[in-house]
Image (spheres, rainbow, N blue to C red):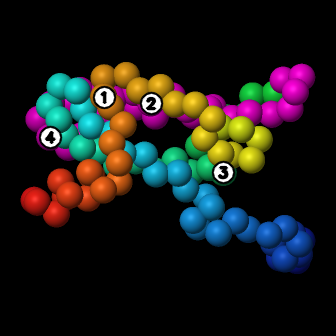
Amino acid sequence: MGLFKRLSGMLSPSPKEDDRAYWLYVQCDRCGEKIKARVDLYNDLSPIYNETGITYFCRKVLIGQGRCYQKVEVEMTFDEQRKLASREIKWGRLISQQEFEQDQAAE
C-alpha cells in the first residue's frame, strides 16, 4: 500500500501553497470589525457539474472575535480553473488586503 501511495505522489504534481489559497477580507456592517478568511481551493470548493463543464461553489460564514457575533456570509463561484467568477456578501462588505493590514498595524 505504501508503495502505491508514494508512486501516486510522484506522478501527480501537488499544487503550490500559493495556488491552493484564495484570501478574503471583509468588514462587518454592524460593528466594523475586519475579518480575514482563507478558502482552500482544493478542499473548500464544491463541484457543480453542468452541460458546459464544471464550476465550483463555496459558502463561508464568518464571525469576528469581537463582541458583535454578527455573521458575515460570503457565497462565491469559481470557474473550471478555480479562478473567482462571482462573489456575493451579506451583512458585510469586501475590503482590500491593505485596509485589513492597516487596521492590524494600528492595534
Task: Locate the C terminus and report the quarter of the image it occupies.
Answer: bottom left
- Tag 2 and tag 4, C-beta contact below 8 Å: no
Q: Where is residue 93 in the image (x, y as percent from the top left)?
A: 32, 31
Q: Residues within 10 Å of mark 2 (few under 14, many from 20)?
A: many
Ranked by sequence position, the earlier of labels 1 and 3 is: 3
Q: Which amino acid does label 4 sit on?
A: Gly
Report the Cα–Cα distance between label 2 and label 1.
Answer: 9 Å
Q: What residue type is labelled 2?
A: Val
- Residue position for label 1: 92
For mark 3, give the secondary structure: loop
Tell me if I can see residue 5 in this picture: no
For mark 4, give the secondary structure: loop
For mark 2, give the secondary structure: strand
Tell me if 70 is positioned left or right of 43 in this view.
left
- Residue position for label 3: 42
- In front of the other: label 1 or label 3? 1
- Residue position for label 2: 74
- Residue position for label 4: 66
Report the Cα–Cα distance between label 2 and label 4.
Answer: 19 Å
Q: Judge whether residue 73 is colored magenta.
A: yes
Q: Position of residue 87 (x, y in %)?
A: 52, 30
